[in-house]
Amino acid sequence: MNNNRTYPRYALPFGDTEIVIVSDGPLDMGTPEDSFRGLSKEEIQKQVLRNFLPIDKVVIEQNIPILTSGGKRLLFETGIGSLSTDDRVSSVGVEAQSRVGLPVG
């Protein structure tokens, strides 16, 4: 899926190493009560309001870090993103043919 969007590229250089952070979009976790177990509804509401968060749902941002060092790239992908990882990663210059998946588990 190529929607011709450009995604922000957040790069953090460290000498000859670079970490690029690519947004993989938001993940709706449902109500705060579904995510923060073991707390009363009142305590959850107090905590989310204290942190300027909505009281009706929890949405977290997902990011894909890409480490480049010594001419090699390492992409950390958890597989739970809500949007097209290929489009987003390609938009920061990492083409699909240069990526190799490693099984986890």
Image (tube, rainbow, N blue to C red):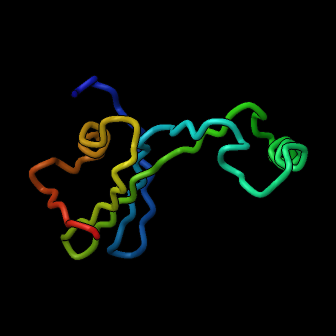
Name the residue nearer the viewer: 43 or 12. Answer: 43
Q: Name the outermost residue toward the left.
A: 97
Residue at 45% across / 62% down in the picture? 12
Name the residue nearer the viewer: 4 or 26. Answer: 26
Residue 86 position within the rendered picture, expressed as x and y whole percent measured from the top left: 24, 41
Residue at 22% across / 76% down in the picture? 70
Please indicate whether residue 23 sits to the left or right of residue 69 in the image: right
Q: Quadrant of residue 67?
A: bottom left
Name the residue nearer the viewer: 31 or 5. Answer: 31
Q: How many marks?
A: 0
> Which image quadrant: the C terminus?
bottom left
Residue at 29% across / 67% down in the picture? 68
Please indicate whether residue 40 sits to the left or right of residue 31 in the image: right
Q: Quadrant of residue 38?
A: bottom right
Vertical arrangement, residue 105 with respect to residue 21, above or below: below
Please indicate whether residue 7 sits to the left or right of residue 56 in the image: left
Vertical arrangement, residue 39 with respect to residue 5, above or below: below
Residue at 30% across / 36% down in the picture? 84
Name the residue nearer the viewer: 29 or 86. Answer: 29
> Which image quadrant: the N terminus?
top left
Residue 66 position within the rendered picture, expressed as x and y whole percent measured from the top left: 33, 60
Residue 81 position within the rendered picture, expressed as x and y whole percent measured from the top left: 39, 43
